[in-house]
Amino acid sequence: MATQEKVATSLEELHNSGYEIAGGQPDITGWDIITRSGKKAGDVDDLLFDPDTNKVRYIIADLDKNELDLDEERMVLIPIGLAELYTKSKAAHRKRQVDPAFSAYNPGEHGNLVYIPTISAQQLDSLPLYEKGRLSRHTEIAIRKILEPANRSEHEEDEFYRHDHFNEDRFYDRED
């Protein structure tokens, strides 16, 4: 069954929406977004959430002032399940196995940052521009295709947010 393109999704920006961040979770607006190399990809501008399910789906990333030689002054969406949240209060307690061949940067040593270990600079540069109020299912599918391996199968529309890209348990700080 083919999915039909919707003009826009029902996702909303969190700030100025009347909704609040869940109790005990920090407001990450303005936090640095760091790649596995330890370089800054941008800052968190806002979060995009589904008001029907009260679940965050994307980080709205401002790529201005990045250290990756990306096009600046762009906003892009990063699915919440591809990011990890590191807070200063949890950094000392968090143990992360870092393979030195994979990464010399350990986000657990810093804190108050959003870590995107599986997204490359090329993928960030390929992401479509985010324009407030103009997110379509077509754009969401394009984001998924850019950020996942080519051998992944298509998913039906009603299962779209069940994908690992939207697994918020990987993002929010949990007690270890």
Image: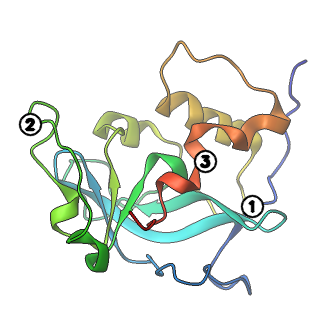
- Gap in angstroms between the C-alphas marked 3 and 2: 28 Å
Query: Which element type, helix, strand or loop, lies under badge 3?
Result: helix
Front one among 119 and 98? 98
Please provide percent x and percent y for residue 77: 53, 53
**Side of 33 where 27 appears, left or right:** right
Sequence order check, earlier mark of 1 and 2: 1
Residue beneath disc 3: 166
Which residue appears at 86% of the width and 27% of the height?
3
Q: Using the rendered view, name the quadrant where residue 72 is placed.
A: bottom left
Sequence order check, earlier mark of 1 and 3: 1
Residue beneath disc 1: 11
Could one spot residue 97 in this view of the protein?
yes
Residue kind at label 2, given as amino acid type: Pro
Please provide percent x and percent y for residue 140: 66, 41
- Gap in angstroms between the C-alphas marked 1 and 2: 38 Å
Q: Which mark is residue 104?
A: none
**Residue 158 versus residue 75 in the image, above or below:** above
**Residue 159 versus residue 77 in the image, above or below:** above
Residue beneath disc 2: 100
Residue kind at label 3, given as amino acid type: Phe
Q: Using the rendered view, name the quadrant where residue 160 is placed.
A: top right
Sequence order check, earlier mark of 3 and 2: 2
